[in-house]
Amino acid sequence: MKTILKLVLILPLCFLIATVQAGGLSMPAPKRVAPPEVAPVTIGKLRIEAIHWGKERGLPQNGGYILARDIDSGKELWTLRVYHIDYDEKMESDVQDIFIERLSRGASGGTVEVVDENGRHFEVDLQARSVKRHE
């Protein structure tokens, strides 16, 4: 009886190990890669930074926001949503996040160029805190 009980307990485990070793079971793929590291941009007395985790700050989305910081004091001055993310409630939200990939100085002295993970380009006028999308 003990031998039969051991077989009942051990055989399924052996089958599972053999299946995994043979590549028969697949582990779920990671939901998405981590957002890219984005170097801040300094223009005048402002340091412009990408905010990846907006929801942790009470914002309605992750990604798509920049933050202006005073260089001298380090104080946050304002945040601005560069683009909107339309979340599909039927899908997990983390796979729908679209993060800022790159910030750079704009052609004019008072603008910042923003590129998101989808390759979309935006120009932010820092004085007016307005956004234009470039096609």
Image: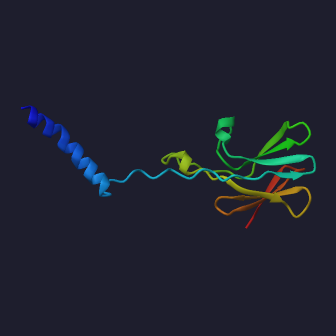
Out of 28 and 114, give the one closest to the viewer: 28
When the figure is inspected, residue 7 is found, relative to residue 25, above or below; the finding is above
Q: Residue 5 in the image: x percent, y percent?
A: 12, 34
Q: Residue 127 in the image: x percent, y percent?
A: 90, 50
Out of 37 and 89, give the one closest to the viewer: 37
Query: How many tags in the picture?
Result: 0
Identify the residue at image location x=90%, y=36%: 73
If the image is split into quadrants, where does the N terminus sit?
Answer: top left
Identify the residue at image location x=49%, y=51%: 30
Q: Residue furthest front?
A: 3
If the image is split into quadrants, where does the C terminus sit?
Answer: bottom right
Out of 94 and 8, give the one closest to the viewer: 8
When the figure is inspected, residue 78 is found, relative to residue 25, above or below; the finding is above
Q: Is residue 58 visible?
A: no
Q: Is residue 45 visible?
A: yes
Q: Residue furthest left?
A: 1
Query: On the picture, is 81 further left or further right than 98?
Result: right
Query: On the picture, is 59 further left or further right than 78?
Result: left
Q: Based on the displayed image, in which of its 4 quarters is residue 60 positioned?
A: top right
Identify the residue at image location x=31%, y=54%: 21
Query: On the picture, is 89 further left or further right than 21?
Result: right
